[in-house]
Amino acid sequence: MHNYLDVLAKIEETGAKAWLVGDTVRMLLMGVQPEVITLAIDSDDMYSVAMALGTGDVDSRGIYPALRGELLGVNFRAFSLRGATIEDDLAQRDLSIEAIALRSDGGIVDPFGGRFDIRNKVIRLTGDNVDLINSDPLRILRMLRFAAEFEMDIFWKTASDVRSFLEEHADHMRDIPMERWGRELMKGLVRRPYRFMRMCDSFRIIPFFLNELEDMKKNHREIFDHTLKVLEVIEKRLDTNKIMQSDAFVLAGLFNNIGLDSIEAKDRTKYTDRLISDCMTRWNIASETIEEVIAIMHMYPKYYEPISEPRFCKGVLEHSEEAVEVALEFAKCVAEAQGKTEQYSDVFESNTWNLRQVLRRFANVRLQTEGAPRYMTGREIMNLLQLKPGKRVGELLDGLDFAVGTGIVNSRAKAEEWLKAQ
C-alpha cells in the first residue's frame, strides 16, 4: 500500500493532485494485489504530467486519453478527472464498489458506500443512478460479470431498475455493437462461465447476444440445461486445473449443443461450424481461438473410445498439443455433466496415459535441441539426402514428426537413420 501512496506523492510533486481509483481501490479492499494501478489526475494535459515525471507515454486511442508508465517499480495508467472534483469523477463510475478513491495521505473518498457494499458482498449502481445504464447499457453485463466473479448479490433496487430498463429499452441493448458484447462476455466467461450465464439468463439478456441459445431454452429445455451443466463442470475445472487455451475451452462449453435442436445429424457438423464461426466473428473473437473451438468440437467425441498413441500423434500434428489436451479434458467435462464419469473412467485413464506418452516424446525433442521443435530442419534434411527444395522434403518432415511422436525416433542419430531408410 505504501508503495502506491508513494507513487501518488511523486505525481503530486508535479503540481497535479492524484488519487487511486476504480478497480485498483476495489482490489486492494478485497485483498488482491493489482498488477497495474489506475489513477485519476486533476490535469487535462497528460503530456505535461509525463514531461514533469520524466516517464510514461500518452495513449489517446480510447474515449479517455491515458498516461501509461512506471514509477517506483509500479506500472500505472492515469486518466484526467471526469468532472471538477474527485466526487464528480466517482459519480460517473457504474458500480459503487468501483466508485472509491484513495488519497496520497491514505484517506479514502467513498461517497456512495462502496466499502460497505464490498464488506456485505453487494453489487449496487453508483448512487442508485439508473441513468448510468442509460448512458451505456452494456454496464448491465459488467454488473452481472462482477456479481458472478465475486459471488456477490445484486442490490434489490439495482436489480429492479435493471429489469425495468430491459423491459422498456430493449432497443438500446440491440443497438450495442456485437464486438462490444463479445469483449465483455469473454471477461465473464473465462472466470465464472456457469454463474455468469445463469445471471445472464435470470435477467433475460441472452437473446441480445446469442439468440440460438435462447431458442434452445424455449424449444428444448433439457439441451439448454445440459449446456449450463457443462459450463458448471468447466467452471470447477478452471478452479482446480491449469487449462491451456482456456478461452476456447469455455467457448466450446457454451456452443457445445448449438444446432442439436434445429438440424439433422448428417448436416450438423457443417452447420455448427458455420454458426460458431459466424457468431464468434461478430464478437470479434480471434480467428485462432475460433479454430481451436471448432477443433475441440470435432475431436472430443472420439475420446469416449480407446485412442492409440499413433492416433493421438496424428491429432497433435494436425491440430496442436494444447488443442488435443483441451479436447480430452473437455470430453471428461461433458461426461461428468451427463453423469457418465464412471462409465468412461477406464477409457479416459488409458487415453490420458497414451496422450502423455506422445507429448513426452515431443517434449524430449525440445530438451535435446534447446527448444527446437524437430531434431532436423528441412535444410539439414536436404543436405543429408542431397535433395532439392520441394514436396518430398515436406513429406519427410511430416513423417519424421510422426516417427518421433510414436517413439520410433528419439535422438538426432535415430532421425538421420530413419531419414536414410526412407
Image (cartoon, rainbow, N blue to C red):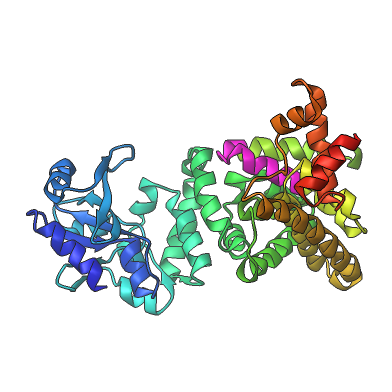
The number of numbered badges drawn on the structure is 0
Q: Is residue 206 above or below residue 329?
A: above
In the picture as drawn, the residue positioned furthest to the left comes out as 15
Q: Position of residue 164 (x, y in %)?
A: 47, 56
Q: Quadrant of the N terminus?
A: bottom left
Task: Write the residue at 39% across / 66% down.
Answer: 124
Q: Position of residue 140 (x, y in %)?
A: 46, 55
Magenta: main secondary structure equals helix
Query: Among all residues in the image, which is located at the extreme bottom?
Result: 119
Please report the residue visible at 28 percent of the width from the left and 61 percent of the height from the top.
73
- Please tell me which residue is depicted at 42% across the width and 64% down the height of the picture: 158
Name which quarter of the figure residue 238 lies in: bottom right
Taking depth in this image into account, of 301 and 367 the one nearest to the observer is 367
| Residue 14 located left or right of residue 257 | left
x%, y% of residue 208? Answer: 57, 45
Is any part of residue 314 visible from this angle? no
Which one is in front, 339 or 135? 339
**Residue 49 drawn in magenta:** no
Residue 126 visible in the snapshot: yes
Left or right, 358 with reference to 85: right
x then y, percent, for residue 413: 79, 46
**Which region shows up in magenta?**
281-296
Residue 292 magenta: yes
The quadrant of the rendering that contains the C terminus is top right
Front-most of residues 271 and 252: 252
Apparent side of residue 66 relative to residue 225 in the rendered image (left or right): left
What residue sits 65% from the left and 50% below the top? 248
